[in-house]
Image (cartoon, rainbow, N blue to C red):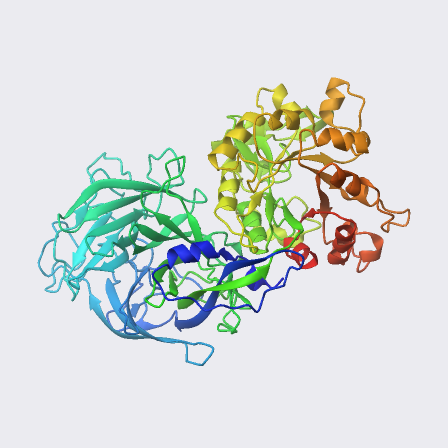
Amino acid sequence: MPRLLALAVAAATAATLFAAQPALATDDRHGGDRPGGDRRNVVVPTLVARATLSADHLEPGPPSGALASPGNGRTGPFAGQVIPGFSAVIDNGDGTYWAQPDNGFGSKANSADFLLRNYLVRADWKTARGGSGALQTLRFISYNDKRHLLDFPIVNGATRERLLTGADFDIESVVRAKDGTFWVGEEFGPFLLHFDRNGTLLEKPYSLAGIKSPQNPYLAAGEAPRARQSGGFEALAASTDGRYLYPIVENAYADAADLRIRVVHEFDIRKGAYTGRTWNYQTDLDGDLVGDAFLTSGKKLLIVERDNWEGDQSVVKRVYEVELGKTDAQGNLVKTLVLDALDIANPDDLAAGDGYGTGETFALPVQSFETVVLLRDGKLLIANDNNYPGNDARIPGTPDDTEFDLIELRRTKVDASDVDVVAHRGASGYRPEHTLAAYALAIRQCADFIEPDVVSTKDGVLVARHENEIGGTTDVAAHPEFADRRTTKTIDGAAITGWFTEDFTLAELRTLRATERLPLVRGANTAFDGLYQIPTLDEVMDLARHSVSCDGEQVGVYPETKHPTYFDSIGLSLAEPLVAELRANDLDRRNAPVIVQSFEVGNLVELNGMTKAPIAQLITGGKPYDFVVSGDPRTYADLVTPAGLAQIAAYADGVGLEKSVMIPRTAAGTLGTPTAVIADAHRVGLTVHGWTFRAENQFLPAEFRSSTDPNAYGDLAGEIRVFVAAGMDGFFTDQPDLGVAAS
């Protein structure tokens, strides 16, 4: 399936978001890509125009960047004022935009020579019909304190103009009031700043009671800052009537119990005071940041959520919609995905030659995706801060240009597949397994389900790991503080030496980073070693329920309980916390996009009495370990007889069959004759999913191998099609993109 459909946003989302906007154009070119299912309406985010400003562009003014960190072959000072990207944009409705950079070079200490400005720019959009794609600066206003309102020292305090610099304020967001003045969200305070249309400060900065950052000029000796450094008002939106401002903190407060919470505040312009009303926005990951906000109508906000990675390391660069006051069971704002900026259709090839993420599928994989604006014609403008000269997401070694990208959400029809594609531990063929990076990539590759294996921490939190032994999937061995945790345990009858999740609290596991489990097979994945945290099951479920498949459905989750008998034996039952997570994520229902699976039987019988969620019995060789412990003589072979399948149907909705159970291999290593198990399972109402389909030759039947190189890719699609033809309803694969193409 073409990757330009790699994340299709449900049509209902666009209908809600753009109810007051003109109808969007339809595009049916990609219907029919997944035959065999019903046709569904989805919305495909599509790049329709683009303009860029050179990273090395300089504006008139004194030299800047004398203390900036060198990067990508550039060293300051620079002979003029740098534009280090734009952190906020205002649509003027006449083809021009006010575009505001931040404080310059990343910190208070290195930005004293950077002047705070707001630039008027015009884009000669590159579109399918032409255009240069140049972003032109027309003029600027300089923010200043000519009225001497500030009562703390500023860099240019002794000058007549008192121009403000990046050592005075870290400006990150801006909106324009009805009277043409500018309100700016700032991070050092955090403050709200009010400037006239020429950039002169009109009022003293508005502080947020009880919230100060480490750089706040009013921070008292010994006072603990609640706002994190550079964690203030990155985002700022204004109500459509102009009365209220909605500043959002970029990061969690230092004393927050949940590190994923970002607080939305409300400020009344008429009263010049905060109203005291707040809302909690929960990010997908602890480290994700809120980059921008835009109020579309009523209380509906577009919010940019981004991680701190760039290029192919990026995981989350998204635009969500929330409605103030509409919260979930946990009291957090309900998020609806509008746009994944890592997965945008580019049918007109509007970014050719500009580096990573500019092909058939367009991405904005920059570290600082910090702008979203809903334009009057219903398109979305997204833009970036390029942290000059440090970011090089597009071309390694070359500073990123400043980009304006116009995105149209095009309604289209696609044929939904009848065959479920389950991303085995995420897109584990391309990223280290059981990381949010692997799961997010699998979603972009059109997986219907993402599959986390779940084990428990010492403090009873379920996390995603293939095994509870983590020596081979994390960098724990490189942590001397955990050297004494290495031990030998008996897990399901086998002695295993290493480090185990149940000996670590979640906080301790958070200090580790994932590594590739099969480095000799998937050497390319080792480039991502040491980057990503171990995700909790809640984070995996959150990512899935806030994502939409290429079929226009909520992405499903397929959790597997690992070693439930063992975890029961040490007082860390997996069942109760699993059911709690299902309920917290609105997945404890018969029609929920979730399937709970296990190789053991007893825990699935128990779960069948605890949850309404669908259940699948996994089948392999040998016998379930709980049968070993209880002395039950039955084996997996007994479970796949007609009588055994009927017993499974009493507590489960499907079976997950190892491939050889469905089609055994011959002595020559080729596929043999299919068994009767698929038909027998269907006869008692069980869905059949097969595992695990991998592209490397060593995992393929002989007739589908491409060479004698065990790690080279063979004909995975050919193997899958044989199993689908035999009646298999879905399958687990390490390469979801190849699985989708075959199904």
Q: Position of residue 742 (x, y in %)?
A: 70, 58
Q: Is residue 300 left or right of residue 201?
A: right
Q: Horizontally, is 542 left or right of 672 in the view?
A: left
Please, which residue is most extreme toward the right here? 667
- With respect to residue 215, does 640 lie above or below? above
The x, y position of residue 656, in whole percent, is 71, 39
- Give above or below for 509 relative to 291: above
**Figure disc tally:** 0
Q: Nearer the viewer, residue 128 or 515?
A: 128
- Front residue of 341 and 413: 413
Q: Is residue 215 visible?
A: no
Side (left or right) of 563 relative to 373: right
Q: Where residue 584 sits: x, y (%)?
A: 47, 34
Q: Nearer the viewer, residue 249 or 521?
A: 249
**Residue 691 picture location, percent across and down:** 72, 44
Report which quarter residue 68 is drawn in: bottom left
Residue at position x 17%, y 56% in the image? 194
Residue 628 sits in which quadrant? top right
Query: Looking at the rendering, in which quadrant would you find the C terminus?
Result: bottom right
